[in-house]
Amino acid sequence: MGYRVVGADLSERMIALAKASALAGCVFYVADACSLPFADASFDVTTVMSALEFIACVETEVGEMARCTKAGGRILVGTINRFSTLTRKRLARGQEPYVSGRLLSPHELWALLAPIGTVRMLANSPRDAAAGGGNIVRRLEARSGMLSGPLLLAEVRKRA
Ligand SMILES: C[S@@+](CC[C@H](N)C(=O)[O-])C[C@H]1O[C@@H](n2cnc3c(N)ncnc32)[C@H](O)[C@@H]1O
């Protein structure tokens, strides 16, 4: 499709799983998201999905994604919405992995991302977010402003 895809995870096992199911040409690194092994402005798009809430150094991680993204490029984040009704029920039940994560509210995620550039955000069900061909940006455009669902999705357009 003309993209060069690079993935990273701290876990060797997760990287092995990614390699086993990835398209040809994708490259993977065992790496700490808080110290990414990539030069400044390496990527047009960076993304972290279902991992921010389990990374100890969230602020540093977001800073690393911003550093590795080109000016005018996009950062996409998918993370559990701490304030959704479903998440609150799961937290009240002590359910994993929710209780072990550092779950963010829409406001907290917004505050983390706003210094990087222009933020758009929605919170919706994972199934709904995957509709429309899984195109997160299209879903953001269509549903921007909905912040009550269990999956927070944010796009940041990095300032020049
Ligand atoms: C719930 S899994 C999600 C994995 C993958 N993003 C996905 O959507 O299938 C969370 C991942 O975060 C990774 N992780 C936790 N801390 C990390 C860090 N400091 N650097 C890189 N990856 C980390 C874990 O190894 C784990 O694979």
Image (cartoon, rainbow, N blue to C red):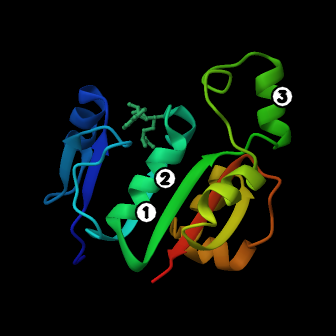
Location of the C terminus by quadrant is: bottom left
Judged from the image, the secondary structure of the residue bearing numbered disc 3 is helix
Q: Nearer the viewer, mark 2 or mark 3?
A: 2
Location of the N terminus by quadrant is: bottom left
Q: Nearer the viewer, mark 1 or mark 3?
A: 1
**Amino acid residing under circle 3:** Lys
Judged from the image, the secondary structure of the residue bearing numbered disc 1 is helix
Q: Give how far across and how far down residue 159 sits, in percent.
A: 50, 79
The reply to whether callout 1 and callout 3 are in contact (CB within 8 Å) is no
Q: Residue at x 45, y 47 (%)?
A: 61
Q: Give how far across and how far down residue 157 sits, in percent.
A: 52, 76
The reply to whether callout 1 and callout 2 are in contact (CB within 8 Å) is yes
Badge number at residue 13: none
Lateral position of residue 34 relative to residue 52, left or right: left
Q: Which residue corresponds to mark 2?
A: 62
Between 90 and 43, the one nearer to me in the picture: 43
| Outermost residue toward the left in this view | 25
Q: Which residue corresponds to mark 1?
A: 66
Q: Give how far across and how far down residue 2 sits, in percent.
A: 22, 78
Lateral position of residue 140 relative to residue 30, left or right: right
Q: Earlier in the sequence, mark 2 or mark 3?
A: 2
Lateral position of residue 39 relative to residue 52, left or right: left
The reply to whether callout 2 and callout 3 are in contact (CB within 8 Å) is no
Q: Which residue corresponds to mark 3?
A: 89
Note whether ligand 1 is within 8 Å of mark 2. Answer: no
Q: Is residue 100 above or below residue 157?
A: above
**Amino acid residing under circle 2:** Val
Q: CA distance from mark 2 to mark 3?
A: 28 Å
